[in-house]
Amino acid sequence: EVQLLESGGGLVQPGGSLRLSCAASGFTFTSYAMTWVRQAPGKGLDWVSTISGSGDRTYYADSVKGRFTISRDNSKNTLYLHMNSLRTEDTAVYYCAKWVAVIPAGDPFDYWGQGTLVTVSS
Amino acid sequence: YVLSQPPSVSVAPGKTARITCGGNNIGREKVHWYQQKAGQAPVLILHYHNDRPSGIPERFSGSKSGNTATLTIARVEAGDEADYYCQVWDTSSDHVVFGGGTKLTVL
C-alpha cells in the first residue's frame, strides 16, 4: 500500500525558514518523480515544486523560485521541501504527491499525502 | 498557461453534472481530474482525460475538444459533493497547472 506522510509544518514568522519532509512507502521511491502542492485556507490547489526520480531535475513555481528548494534522499525514501524567506502568503496545507512516471511530463499524481499545515505569521 | 473552471455547479441527485475546464488548445493536452472532499486530500479520478484509476466508478467520464475539457458525472449521488480540479503539464514552462477548482453541490 502506497503511503505518503508529511511532517515539519508549524508556525513560523515572516522571513523565517522551515523544512518539510514526506516519508514514502509501498513503492519503489527512486522510480517516480515527486511533487509538492499547497492549498491556502479556502483556496484551490497550487503547484509548488517537482523533482525527478533520480533527483537530477527540479522544477519550481515562479512564486517560490529562489526561496524554496526541493530535494530527496532515495536511501531514506524521503522527499523534502526547504522553505526560506517565508511570507504570509505561503500559509497553506502542503501536500506531497507521487507522479506516475520517473520524469515529470504530461502525467498525473496518483497518490497524495494528507498534508501538513504551514502558518506564516508574526 | 491558464485553466479556467466555473466556481460552482449544482445538480439534483440522479442527474448529470458537467464541469468544464477551459484552456488554450486543451484538446491537445493530457488532462487529469482530481476530487477533493471537505477536509481530505485530493484523489485522482480521471487521467489522460478519460481513463479511470482502479476503484473510480464508471459514472465519472471525461471528454475534451478544442479549448474545453469536460468532466461528466452521471447519476450524481450525495457523496459526489466535493471540489473538482483539472490539471495539465505545461510543456512550454515545465510547470504543473491546476484549474481554479469547481465546487459541486448536490441539491
Image (cartoon, rainbow, N blue to C red):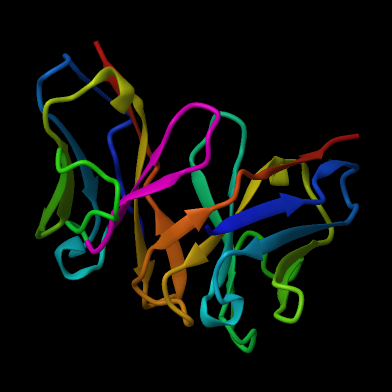
Left or right placement of residue A13 versus residue A118 in this view: right
Residue furthest out toward the top? B107
Query: Residue B59 lies in what quarter of the image?
Result: top left
Q: Residue at x 50, y 46 (%)?
A: A45
> Vertically, is A87 above or below B80?
below
The answer to whether residue A107 of the structure is visible from this angle is yes
Q: Residue at x 70, y 72 (%)?
A: A77
Q: Residue at x 53, y 34 (%)?
A: B40
Where residue B52 sits in the image (x, y, percent)?
23, 54
The answer to whether residue A61 of the structure is visible from this angle is no
Q: Looking at the figure, which quarter contains the C terminus of chain A?
A: top right
> Vertically, is A35 above or below A53?
above
> Vertically, is B39 above or below B11?
below
Magenta span of residues: B32-48
Left or right placement of residue A21 versus residue A97 in this view: right
Q: Residue at x 40, y 42 (%)?
A: B100
> Vertically, is A105 above or below B81?
below
Looking at the rendered structure, the number of numbered marks drawn on it comes to: 0
Compare residues A110 and B104 and report the one nearer the observer: A110
Where residue A58 sits in the image (x, y, percent)?
61, 79
**A18 within the magenta span:** no
